Amino acid sequence: MDMTIILNTLEEGAVPGQISTLINDDVEVINTSDMKIAHCTGCNLCWLKTPGICAIKDDYEGILKKLVGAENLWLVSDTRFGFVDWRGKKVMDRIVPMLNMYVEFRDGLERHELRYHPLNFGLLYKGQADQEFLEEWSRRVASNMAGKSLGVYNIKEGELCM
Amino acid sequence: MHVVIINGSPRVQKNSNTDKIIQSFGKGLQAAGATFELYSLSNRQEWDAAREAFIGHDQIIFALPLFVECVPGIMLEFLESLPTERKSPAQLSFILHGGFDEGHQFRLGERFLQSLPEQFGCTYGGCLIQGGSFLIRFRDDEKMKKVMDQKMDAYIQMGQSFVSNGHFMTEEARKFIGYEKNPRIVHLLFRLFIKRLVRKNFERFAQQWGCTRPLDDKPYLI
């Protein structure tokens, strides 16, 4: 298992040029702009009633099934207020079924146990944002998934910049 | 003082822990002679009224749960619909809470919230933070009731304190969170005793909800 999932949440849908060159058999890009994905409602059913299964029946279920077979997750997102915009945050809020209700201490911090396996996380963002803030966010998101941060890169005119 | 409180949680109001916190905090506001009006972003029909209230009042509090290390997506969507300039000055404050109880868990979310008021032409009134919210939903459970009543009373007190100070930038509010990280002794106790107790409680709640699968089930495993 060495699969990489790229969740492209850009409103215009199209994958920035440089990213499409990365695509191969082990990399799958999912454009979420034309998918039906609701906000997580924090209902807790995926932890306490139907463990691992989200109560919202929409296109995110297919994404979850793919994440179960993946090792790396990249989020492609536009930004707002110095952070990822709501389109990017929405698909991350729905990741909760990848963890379970049980808690443990991991790296000295309270964490939920993994339902499946560790997932690395990286971020490709568009627009003006606080790079250092996004790096810390990416580290924290990865740490929740017991994975490592793959880095945070700004997309400028189709090119990836450090 | 009149306070506009916007509940930034996506969870439906009747089950919202944020709503319970707001209700207690609001009791404190009222006890100190202030009034408040409340809008819940989980109900889209309240968005227009919430936006009008944000524009028209000078004392605004967003109350929200931490979602994936920051603000819930639904609240980001609402923020994007707000004007970034305003005619009359206002103070923007926050009540941030979440399941885990360590202060460290909230710091990045707090940092984001700190950066917001300026982007809307408002001043920052501070951020009141407390974890351990998961059990609020189970506050009527006989084993949880006492602790949860104490927790809610503390929010009533902070409501009163907000009226007398006018903001959350006080030592009292800063200490509201408790431990920044759990001391080592807690890690040890957790491994020895607490973990098993916590697991049993979760399993009991799940049973009450009609769960028939193990909580660590792997439904999509290939």
Image (spheres, coloured by chain):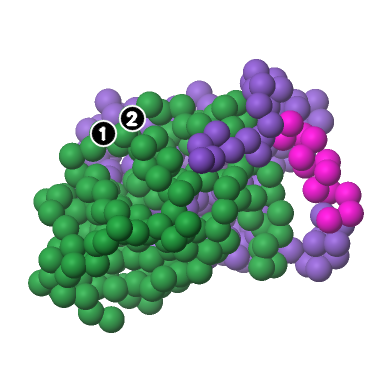
Callout 1: SS: loop
Residue on which disc 2 sits: A58
Say above or below: A57 vs A104.
above
Residue on which disc 1 sits: A36
* Residue B94 in sight in this render: no
Callout 2: SS: loop
Dot placed on the residue nearer the N-terminal end, 2 or 1: 1
Nearer the observer, B3 or B105: B105
Q: Check contact, mark 2 vs mark 1: CB within 8 A.
A: yes
From the viewer's perspective, tell me whether residue B174 is left or right of residue A54. right
At x 55%, y 58%, the residue is: A118
Nearer the observer, B210 or B20: B210
Say above or below: A112 vs A20.
above
Determine crowd level at label 1: few under 14, some 14-19, many 20+ residues with C-alpha closer than 10 A: few
- The spot of residue A30 in percent (x, y) is 26, 49
At x 81%, y 31%, the residue is: B143
Residue ranking furthest to the bottom:
A162
- The spot of residue B164 in percent (x, y) is 54, 53
Nearer the observer, B143 or A42: A42
Say above or below: B201 vs A16.
above
Instruction: Identify which amino acid the numbered label 2 is placed on.
Output: Asp
Q: Which residues are magenta?
A: B191-203
Chain painted purple? B
- In the rendered image of the structure, the colour used to display chain A is green
From the viewer's perspective, tell me whether residue B173 is left or right of residue B49. right
Instruction: Identify which amino acid the numbered label 1 is placed on.
Output: Lys
